[in-house]
Image (spheres, grey):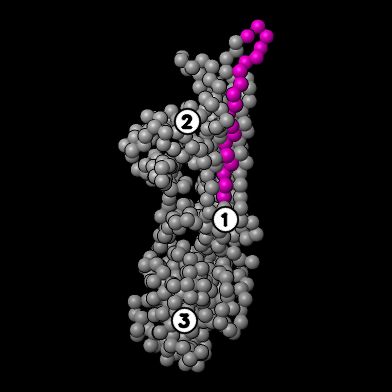
Amino acid sequence: MFYDYAKIHVKAGDGGNGVVAFRREKYVPYGGPSGGDGGDGGSIILEADEGLRTLVDFRYRTHYKADRGEHGSGKNQHGKNAPDKILKVPVGTVIKDAENNRIIADLTKPGQQVVVAKGGRGGRGNARFVSSTHRVPTLAENGDPGEERWIILELKLLADVGLVGFPNVGKSTLISRVSEAKPKIADYHFTTITPNLGVVRVDEGRSFVMADIPGLIEGAAQGAGLGHRFLRHVERTKVLVHVLDISGSEGRNPLEDFRIVNNELKEYSQLLIKRPMIIAANKIDLPGAENNLKLIKEELKEYEIFPISAATGEGLKSLIYRLADLLDETEDVDEVPQVEEEQMRMIKVEDEPKFFIEKEGNVFIVSGPEVDKHWARTNFNNEEAVKRFLQILDAMGVVKELRNRGAKDGDVVRVNNLEFDFVD
């Protein structure tokens, strides 16, 4: 089954905790601190794999979690870093942040990787806190929590030529005649409900990939008839072939069909309508086709028009050779802006304040990303660690801001689920 969409939750591993330890050796009665650092947690990495064709592996499992780092130990032994968890996705997968729909990365090359959740840093052991004034530290840090988020995976097929047009105009028959693709073919609408890929061999050493995109209908750009899912696969194609039922066999007007589908392409993306486009006037072997062909040529003079019959093979050779030449003249498509390496992580706003202070009744509530980071690193069962946490808040300017907000001796200050008495 072809799956081109998935939404998954990824959780990187937490960092291992640092440890409080001291040397205990014979003839060394006052051995110094020797607590080792915790190891880093494993990150979640997505990697493009050319052997995959769909996102079916993510259909039945939505949660992925990496291992946490190993805790530190005595004798300055650091914990091991946890291995990264690598998830394989098809080449052509676009990764988005589910919260804001921001593009994180576009994996268009085999082996290309992106970190979607970074593992937490390991906590420092007490050996790291030795200083000239503090010879016997009895505190260590907890490891940082690993990043977690919901992400959306969207597969966009990588093809040179995309076949577009209304349902039942002969796209599947066309791709089956010029390639080894075996799509379902029948005389009713929406026979094709998933894209089909086929390799078209022109000459020795000369070929291209053609995609049969399921039939578009009016309103596809707004999602009608699964329009967004179909149109997504057209975005990467270098050349478009607009297949028309030139015979009007279903009582349709080929010229009106052309305008409707082109309008949907334009509504979905202004870039699509600028792609090189050839018209394949199909079903030329049926009655009434010649008259409609003359009308099409008069009205659409700016397009190359190839009369064909996908059923009999008439005109297909000329069409295929022209497409091969046109591909040689056309540059590669890059419709999704490539994301810089430093942007391939969770959104971080550089000017975001380090902390926020709110007041509920007589309680001052302190929060913020920087506060949460140091909170997670602090072992609140250790008196010295708690003291250091409060010193960090003071250095950040929290105490000064509380004073400016009117805090007085004895007022309650809450940080997460812990409450302190304010002392000026």
What x and y, as percent, mark residue 267? Answer: 39, 71
Q: Residue furthest top?
A: 27
> Is 57 in front, or is 235?
57
- Mark nearest the camera among 1 and 3 is 1
Task: Identify the secondary structure beneath mark 2.
Answer: helix
| Quarter of the figure that contains the C terminus | top left
Segment colored magenta = 10-29
Label located before the other in sequence (1 or 2): 1
Count of number-bearing discs: 3
Mark sitting on residue 34: none
> Is 147 situated above or below 250?
above
**Residue 124 image offset from top left, x and y in percent:** 54, 28
Marker disc for residue 8: 1
Of labels 1 and 3, earlier in sequence is 1
Tell me the residue at 39%/32% (across/down).
409
Q: CA distance from mark 1 to mark 2?
A: 35 Å
Residue 348 appears in the rendering? yes
Task: Determine the CA span between mark 2 and mark 3.
Answer: 70 Å
Task: Give the residue type at disc 1.
Answer: Ile
**Would you say 150 lies left or right of 332 here?**
right
Res 244 label: 3
Question: Label 3: few (<14), some or many (≥20) within 10 Å?
Answer: many
Is 21 on the left or on the right of 100, as rendered? right
Q: Which residue is mark 2?
A: 389
Q: Nearer the viewer, residue 97 or 332?
A: 97
Q: Nearer the viewer, residue 412 or 189?
A: 412
Q: Is residue 161 visible?
A: no
Position of 384 relative to 52 (above/below): above
- For the point 51% across and 85% down, which residue is it? 283
The secondary element bearing badge 1 is classed as strand
Question: Mark 1, mark 2: which one is toward the viewer?
Answer: 2
